[in-house]
Amino acid sequence: MKLDNTYPKCIGTVIAKKGCWSFLKGGFLWDSTLNSSQIDFQNSDRTKRFVDIEIISYSLQPFIERQWRSNQFEGIKKERKRAVTIHVVDEKEFRLPGAAVKVNQISTDFPFGSMISRTILGNLPYQKWFLKRFKATVFENELKWYKTEPLPGQFNYTVVDQMMEFVRKNKLIARGHNMFWDDPVFVQDWVENMSAPQLQEAMSRRIESVMSKYRNEFFHWDVNNELLHFEFYEKKLGPNVTLDMFNKVHRKDPLATLFLNEYNIVERCDSKANVDRYIDKFKELKKGGVTVAGIGLESHFAIPNPAFMRAVIDKLATLKLPIWLTEVDVSRMYGLEEQALYLEQILREAFSHPSVNGIMLWTARSIGGCYQTCLTDEKFHNLPTGDVVDQLLLKEWQTGTKRGKTNEFGSYSFRGFLGEYKVSVIYNHKVVDSYFSLGRGVETKHITVHV
């Protein structure tokens, strides 16, 4: 899209194939005072100058900000909440009107977490701040191959073991990040110089080494990180190397969901990593027999484009695979207030989309700060970004406490966020506690409490 004399901005991409129709979906934010713009469809291969592009069934759907936010709200209400009716009865199954009911949400169903690094070890203020908010985590660098085997055969899991102890003690769930990374910058020198047979043996050793210690400990594994941008393993071992990685990891840990993880899928247009190329990779894995794949969207944002995000996730959702935002942050080139504003836009758009299964922030405090986005200062007082997280996680996206009395039919109804609940009923000076899980469903969940 081009506004008068400004540079054109990419608002959507598609891999168009000869002889068939290809579906292009994009989006943009109109924040210009100009009255006109131009939308061009451009072939990315500049060497092919004469290409006919035919367009049918095109539409442009405008929303004002209030409508967009209303759509997000309705999406959250439909996908993240469910109606509940609690029936209070006596020992003869007669319903009891006028019973006092108190409902507390104990935990949320949606996994929302943040990355941690070794700096959390022994840091009690950091641990207290983290555990108040998150039940899911991922390690920054500590589990990566270049950290656990810096020299051939010299394995070191000391720090990982300590971090896993923190995970186990606090009953967190953890993503495994990562088994292999296609970026040659992060490949050890001794690995880089191997022959193909030597590399295959070293990779098998890597998988065996990790799984012998942590099998069933990580519920996800990023198997091959950033394979659209980089191709170290493909150049060494051929185009089927990722499929081979998936099969070997799955055999060792069949309960884990195995992910590809990539950046610039939802963040912005990228000639190397667009949504169609990503979809093709997952189709290749499925064709090769992989049935436990998950879609990792790193989500390292500058200024987010929620309309573009939604368009991309809509296309990825056609694969019917788990979708996670795995490394969410906002560039440090923006001020704290701007980072908070952009982070809120990202989180609201992701949480409201029915196909997003989880969100992981890339916001660990390390010595000297954070990768791009910090949620607190060095004393663990919230920054504006931390306030956004608290507003959403601890207030808006939790049911909190509900109080009321059963109606003339002995029932009390509410709508709550998915998760675990405790119900306390008081009737004739008798108190009864009950627990229930609220999972996804269209129909009202009915709970009966006997007094």
Image: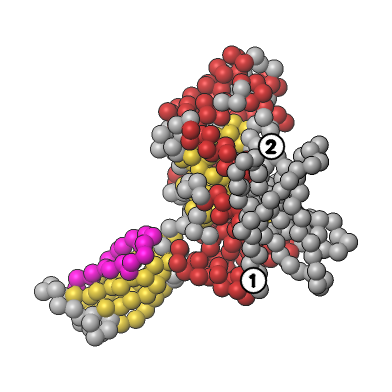
Magenta-tinted stretch = 433-451
Where is the N terminus found, in terms of image quarters?
bottom right
| Residue hosting label 1 | 63
Could you tell me residue 291's position as x and y percent? 44, 37
**Which image quadrant is residue 98 in?**
bottom left
Q: Residue at x 48, y 35 (%)?
A: 286
Which residue lies at the image location 59% right of the left edge and 14% below the top edge?
A: 197
Q: Can the viewer see residue 213?
A: no
- Residue 202 visible here: yes
Reading the image, the residue beneath label 2 is 229
Which residue is at the far right?
A: 5
Task: Give the total number of marks visible in the rendering.
Answer: 2
* Type of amino acid at the residue the image marks with label 2: His
Q: Residue 347: which disc?
A: none
Colouring rule applied to residues: secondary structure
Specify few, some or many for label 2: CA neighbours under 10 Å numbering under 14, 14-19, or 20 or more. Answer: some
Q: Nearer the viewer, residue 145 or 427?
A: 145
Q: Quick one: quadrant of the C terminus?
A: bottom left
The amino acid type of the residue labelled 1 equals Phe
